[in-house]
Image: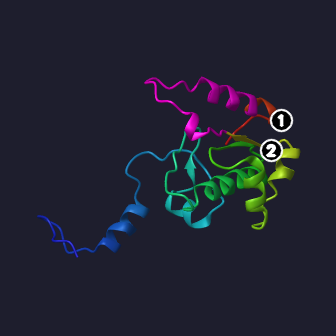
Amino acid sequence: MIWPGEGQTWWSREDDMTALSEAPAGPLLSNAATGIAGLDEITRGGLPEGRSTLVTGGAGCGKTLLAVQFLVAGAREHGEPGVLVTFEESAEEVTANVASLGFDLAGLHRDGQLAIVSVRADPSAIIETGEFDLDPLFLLLEDAIKRVVRGVRR
């Protein structure tokens, strides 16, 4: 329970979470469904459309699985091609890892619905020199986007 302020009554955090999920703080953004029912519900329809969403967390917390679910749902349910960028796993490793969950990434790739860009760097070869150049990563992304047939949406 939270001590009420002037003119307020007692309320609990559960009441607060219900109120937050029912009343938007501002104008709603157009969203792209993730295909994950509970996540789409609490985000009022999915991730903000046309914007980048940074997903962070430790190894094994589900970042890649979230991205794969989002991309597969986009391709299968909405006809929206996408690009998956991985930094620790190869395209083959990701494809094999999610196949047991029913995700056919190779099929989506063949159909022009998905491109996977694997960016791997040998940590022993990295030397900190001050400025970091992301241009090579952007060139890889641009190439992947061009390879997806109908234009990337995710």
Q: How far apart, in angstroms, are the residues tagged by discs 1 and 2?
A: 7 Å
For the record, the magenta segment spans 119-144
- Does residue 23 appear left or right of residue 139 in this picture? left
Image location of residue 26, percent across then percent down: 39, 47
In the figure, is residue 7 to the left or right of 127?
left
Instruction: Give the mark nearer the N terminus: 1 vs 2.
Output: 2
Looking at the picture, tell me which residue is in the foreground, 93 or 2: 93
Amino acid at dot 1: Val
Q: Position of residue 139 (x, y in %)?
A: 68, 25
- Amino acid type indicated by mark 2: Gln
Question: Is residue 46 part of the magenta span, yes or no?
Answer: no
User: Circle 2 is placed at which residue position?
Assistant: 113
Element type where label 2 sits in the image: loop
Q: Which mark is residue 149?
A: 1
The percent coordinates of residue 7 (x first, y second) are: 14, 65
User: How was the colour assigned to the protein in this rendering?
Assistant: rainbow
Label 2 CA crowd tier, 10 Å (few <14, some 14–19, many 20+)? many
Q: Is residue 95 above or below residue 114?
A: below
Question: Residue sitting at 49 percent across and 51 percent down?
Answer: 56
- Vertical comparison of 125 with 20: above or below: above
Q: Is residue 152 left or right of residue 13?
A: right
User: What residue do we see at 57% from left, 54% from top?
Assistant: 46
Q: Quadrant of the N terminus?
A: bottom left
Residue 122 is a magenta residue: yes
- Front residue of this view, candidates 152 and 84: 84
State the quadrant of the C terminus. Answer: top right
Q: State which quadrant residue 124 falls in.
A: top right
Which element type, helix, strand or loop, lies under badge 1? loop
Residue 115 vertical position relative to residue 142 in the rendered view, above or below? below
Marks 1 and 2 close (CB-CB < 8 Å)? yes
Residue sitting nearer the eye, 54 or 93: 93
